[in-house]
Every structure is written in structure tokens, then in C-alpha cells.
Amino acid sequence: MRKFLVVLDDSRECLNAMRFAAMRAASTGGGVKILSVIPPEEFNHWIGVSDLMREEARERIEVHYEVFAKWMRDRQNVDPELKIREGEAVTEILSEIREDSEIGVLVLGAGNDRKGPGPLVSQMSRNSGSLPIPITVVPGDLTKEQLEAIT
């Protein structure tokens, strides 16, 4: 089964990327893999504090994931899977793509403010020529109706 890999983070544009991935998966018979990356700088503390912070970050991600997963299951009939990795976002995304041969498309949400599309879209775009899969960049200001029309 072809999977759409979508990145779960704290950005507003993440929502449209999630919606797009779920809608495309539903219409093509594919799946959705949600990747969340915990940056290493969050754990530069003593070991005990670091372990506690790591566990809290994972719990926060799982709660956030369940909101999207419930919507995907209820509205799109897609049961997503969650993968949590620790490290630098681009490195971990590339590793996930290499390790899971079922991933067929990377879906990223683009910011719509003056700062540009966001650091992840900018960094992944630089690597796009060497990726084994295409990247779909979903504008953050598309409405649900627009997303439905294009998926």
C-alpha cells in the first residue's frame, strides 16, 4: 500500500497537510503515516530531567496525533500510523523515507506569512532533487472546500 508521509508539528499549516494526506489516501486507497520529530535540543539537561522531558514530549505528540487520527478515521475512513523520532527534522524525515519502502509521497504544509513557506519546506525543497519520492506542498490557507476539490 502506498503511504502518504505527513509531518506533525506545532505549525498552523500542519492542519492542511494532514487533511490533504488523509483525503488523498482515502481517494486512492492508500495509507497515512504521521511522523513527529522531537528536536535534540529539547533534552540537553541532566539525565533524569531529560528522560522526563522526553516522555512529556511523546505524550503531547500522542495527544495531538489522536485528534488528527480520529478525524481521519471518522471522516476519511483512513487509519493512520504514528512514528516518533528524535533528531533533526530533515535527517529524520529522510531516514523514515529510506526505511519505509511503502512511503510514496511526502506531504508538507506551507506557511502563508511573509517569512516564506517555513523552514521545513525550504530545507526539504533543497533536497527534492535527490529524494526517491515526490513532495507535495500544501498551501496553509486553502479552505476545506478547496482541499476537497483537489483531492
Image (tube, rainbow, N blue to C red):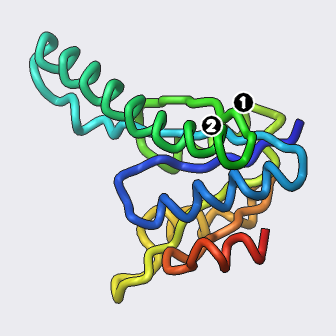
Mark 1 to mark 2 CA distance (whole Å): 6 Å
Q: Mark number for residue 47?
A: none
- In the rendered view, would you say 75 is above or below 42? below
Task: Name the residue: 20% across, 24% down.
Answer: 53
Q: Mark number for residue 95?
A: 2
**SS class of the residue under badge 2?**
helix
Pointers 1 and 2 in contact (C-beta within 8 Å)? yes
Q: Which residue is mark 1?
A: 99
Task: Name the residue: 67% across, 48% down.
Answer: 75
Three-letter amino acid code at the position of disc 2? Ser
Three-letter amino acid code at the position of disc 1? Glu
- Residue 68: x and y in percent read 52, 44
Direction from residue 20 to residue 83 in the image, left or right: left
For this orientation, the residue located farthest to the front is 74
The one nearer the camera, 19 or 9, is 19
- Residue 1: x and y in percent read 89, 36
Residue 132 appears in the picture as rendered? no
- Residue 54: x and y in percent read 27, 23
Direction from residue 143 to residue 106 in the image, left or right: right
For this orientation, the residue located farthest to the top is 48
**SS class of the residue under badge 1?**
helix
- Residue 137: x and y in percent read 63, 70
Residue 118 appears in the picture as rendered? yes
Asked which quadrant contains residue 128, the reply is: bottom right
Task: Name the residue: 69% across, 51% down.
Answer: 22
Direction from residue 114 to residue 44 in the image, left or right: left
For this orientation, the residue located farthest to the bottom is 114
For label 1, the crowd category at 10 Å Cα-Cα, with few meaning under 14, some 14 to 19 and many 20 or more, is few
- Label count reads 2
Direction from residue 123 to residue 40 in the image, left or right: left
